[in-house]
Amino acid sequence: MKQHANGYVSNRVLKLNVGFILSAGPGYSHETTFDVPAVRVAEDVDLAFIRGTLRLSRTKEGVLVQGDLHVGVEGECYRCLDPLQQDVAISIEELYAYPPSRVAEFSVGEDAILDLAPLVRAEAIIADARGALCQPDCKGLCPECGVNLNHESSHAHEDDIDPRLAKLKELLDR
């Protein structure tokens, strides 16, 4: 598989020729396996990998795509903003209309090409929206200065205590 100068394989790997499925008629199904390295699915979504198996089934309305994929989502910890990569499982079940229809969200083109990129993009964005932690006990960022508390062993600021709580601090100090 050829990698481009930007480190990604072409997203053409997500375009499947399903002409043989369309000509076989309703009831026919075919399984296809993905093991794709880093791929730019769309201008705003890069995935570190795509792995899994999809079943493509011919129906009267088009091609039903079903299966589970694992995608490598690169993002950042939502507490400390450190970069991280997570393996996210996405379930896919979508009907690609054939012949193409204006009312269908996804369809197989007249050239019998089924483009998985828009569907994988949407599922990856939904999976990434949940947020992730770099570690379960991530300490996050200091609210005063913004330093990453996971990397600082001892981090302290001057005690600028609220005057309304000064008496409580005196009790704690005793």
Image (cartoon, rainbow, N blue to C red):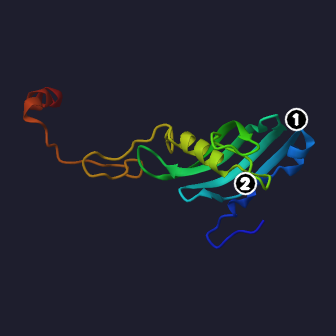
Q: Residue at x 87, y 45 (%)?
A: 21
Give the left or right position of residue 45, taking residue 158 as reference.
right
Distance between the Cα atoms at labels 2 and 1? 23 Å
Disc tally is 2
The residue indicated by pointer 2 is 14
Give the left or right position of residue 107, taking residue 135 as reference.
right
Q: Where residue 156 sits: x, y (%)?
A: 26, 47
Marker disc for residue 40: none
Q: Quarter of the image for the N terminus: give it.
A: bottom right
The residue indicated by pointer 1 is 26
Q: Where residue 53 sits: x, y (%)?
A: 79, 42
Q: Tell me the element at label 2.
A: helix
Q: Residue at x 68, y 53 (%)?
A: 49
Q: Tell me the element at label 1.
A: loop
Characterize the local packing of mark 1: few (<14), some (14-19) or many (20 or more) Cα atoms within 10 angstroms.
some
In the image, farthest residue toward the bottom: 5
Characterize the local packing of mark 2: few (<14), some (14-19) or many (20 or more) Cα atoms within 10 angstroms.
many
| Mark 2 vs 1, N-terminal side | 2
Question: Looking at the rendering, which quadrant does residue 127 occupy?
Answer: top right
Q: Residue at x 70, y 64 (%)?
A: 9
Q: Is residue 2 above or below residue 11?
A: below
Q: Residue at x 55, y 59 (%)?
A: 43
Q: Where residue 172 sits: x, y (%)?
A: 17, 28
Q: Where residue 106 sits: x, y (%)?
A: 67, 43
Callout 1 amino acid: Pro
Callout 2 amino acid: Leu
Q: Quarter of the image for the C terminus: give it.
A: top left
Relative depth, front residue between 27 and 152:
27
